């Protein structure tokens, strides 16, 4: 489909369509500002190849300027029913293992097009049926969130997310801990001494494919050994999630440079981290520890050792925890916000959902205002 601004759009479906895009996608990665793992070809290939995401519901909408690929929007097509009527929606690929999301856009085109342009193109695209498009959990400074900043579409709603906790690693070890309380720093030293009474404490880092392939099973076993394994929420509890993480660990994509850290006490591996490094940021996706070592705080000891290693390397400037878990409060020195953009189509279903959502938001805000007023009076 040809649009204005010399842009043409095309649709690619499932794993077959993704692989048709591989060459252009990998070239586009080099032109993405603030490149992260969720922009990488291998991230989506691992999700579809493992079955973590249903490829039959996956669509990649591309934008090209002549022969040059300048944008990719990875989406899922879903259908829900209300009052016996079907409603079609588009959203980013959705999984508890794929928290942060974004479009993949050439930095030179981010300010040339807007959300209004995107909505207009999608509304004219007859091959895609949709009533609502929800782009959720995007970095607020990411590709899609910055698209034509300030230019909104009709029937568009924006929401601010909870954000991702950030831990600095750009200074010396002492400087990176300056924002922490004296009590917390004493606790870090106490836990390490306690661990050292059991055995020698060491950090094992795996950043090459061979090392990661050897370490990934150790990490999966540690994560499965605790409550996640008992409740069925561990990586090993599902063939699809196991394959997803194995595929990621074995990839050689520089846009998603996988890294695994393991804490060793004596001869035992007792804690691990799984994440990605890109453009000076370590995105920490998964943590795990053996619960029989809980009294020495293995996850805490490991994170402190990783910060110390990053401080010496001068390559990784910060750790992004992807979410903002409760345990991160003493560690974090800031956060990076996330954003959700929701678009509605000019279909009966889209207009209905837009009005319904606006009404729900209005009632929720009114209820909060009433509760706040009652609290002030009391």
Image (spheres, helix red, strand yellow):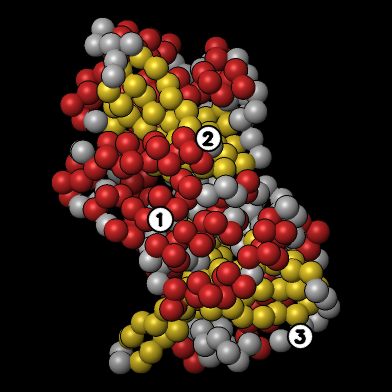
Tell me if 215 is positioned left or right of 142 in this view.
left
Residue 77: horizontal and vertical position, in percent? 46, 78
Q: Is residue 182 left or right of residue 223?
A: right
Which of the two discs, 2 and 3, labels the residue nearer the N terminus? 3
Q: Which residue is mark 1?
A: 244
Give the camera-side residue of 364 and 120: 120
Q: Is residue 62 above or below residue 120?
A: above
* Residue density around tag 2, few if under 14, some if 14–19, many if 20 or more, within 10 Å: some
Q: Are marks 1 and 3 in contact (CB under 8 Å)?
A: no
Give the CA distance from mark 2 to mark 1: 18 Å
Q: 278 or 138, which is in the foreground?
A: 278
Report which residue position mark 2 lands on.
207
Q: Nearer the viewer, mark 2 or mark 3?
A: 2
The residue under the point 20% across, 38% down is 226
Q: What residue did someone put label 3 on? A: 2
Q: Quadrant of the C terminus?
A: top left
Q: What is the spatial separation of the Cα atoms under label 2 and label 3, in whole angstroms?
A: 43 Å
**Within 10 angstroms of label 1, few (less than 14), some, or many (20 or more) residues?**
many
Is 110 drawn above or below residue 227 in the view shown?
below
From where the camera sits, is residue 325 visible? Answer: no
Say which element carries label 3.
loop
Residue 174 numbered tag: none
Earlier residue among tags 2 and 1: 2
Write down the quadrant of residue 1 in the picture. bottom right
Of the numbered discs 1 and 3, the one sitting upstream in the chain is 3
């Amino acid at each position: 489909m040809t649009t204005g601004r010399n842009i043409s759009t095309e649709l690619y479906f499932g794993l077959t369509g993704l692989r048709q895009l591989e060459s252009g996608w990998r070239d586009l990665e080099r032109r993405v500002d603030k490149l992260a793992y969720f922009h990488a070809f291998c991230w989506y290939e691992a999700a579809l190849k493992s079955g973590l995401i249903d490829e039959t519901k996956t669509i990649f909408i591309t934008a090209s300027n002549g022969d040059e690929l300048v944008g990719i929007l990875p989406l899922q097509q879903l259908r829900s029913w209300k009052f016996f009527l079907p409603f079609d929606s588009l959203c980013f690929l959705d999984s508890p293992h794929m928290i942060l999301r974004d479009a993949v856009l050439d930095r030179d085109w981010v300010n040339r097009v807007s959300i209004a342009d995107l909505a207009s193109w999608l509304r004219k695209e007859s091959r895609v049926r949709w009533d609502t498009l929800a782009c959720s959990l995007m970095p607020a400074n990411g590709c899609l969130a910055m698209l034509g900043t300030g230019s909104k579409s009709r029937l568009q709603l924006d929401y601010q997310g909870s954000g991702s906790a950030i831990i600095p690693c750009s200074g010396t070890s002492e400087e990176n801990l300056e924002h922490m309380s004296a009590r917390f720093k004493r606790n870090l030293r106490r836990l390490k001494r306690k661990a050292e009474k059991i055995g020698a404490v060491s950090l094992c880092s795996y950043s090459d494919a061979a090392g990661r392939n050897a370490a990934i099973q150790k990490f999966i076993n540690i994560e499965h050994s605790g409550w996640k394994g008992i409740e069925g929420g561990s990586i090993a509890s599902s063939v699809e999630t196991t394959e997803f993480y194995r595929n990621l660990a074995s990839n050689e994509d520089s846009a998603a440079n996988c890294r695994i850290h393991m804490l060793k006490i004596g001869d035992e591996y007792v804690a691990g981290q799984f994440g990605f490094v890109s453009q000076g940021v370590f995105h920490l996706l998964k943590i795990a520890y053996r619960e029989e070592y809980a009294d020495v705080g293995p996850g805490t000891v490991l994170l402190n050792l990783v910060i110390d290693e990053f401080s010496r390397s001068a390559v990784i400037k910060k750790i992004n925890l992807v979410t903002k878990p409760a345990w991160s409060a003493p560690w974090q020195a800031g956060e990076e916000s996330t954003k959700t953009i929701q678009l509605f189509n000019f279909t009966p279903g889209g207009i209905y959902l837009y009005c319904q959502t606006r009404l729900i938001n209005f009632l929720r805000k009114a209820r909060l205002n009433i509760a706040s007023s009652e609290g002030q009076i009391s």
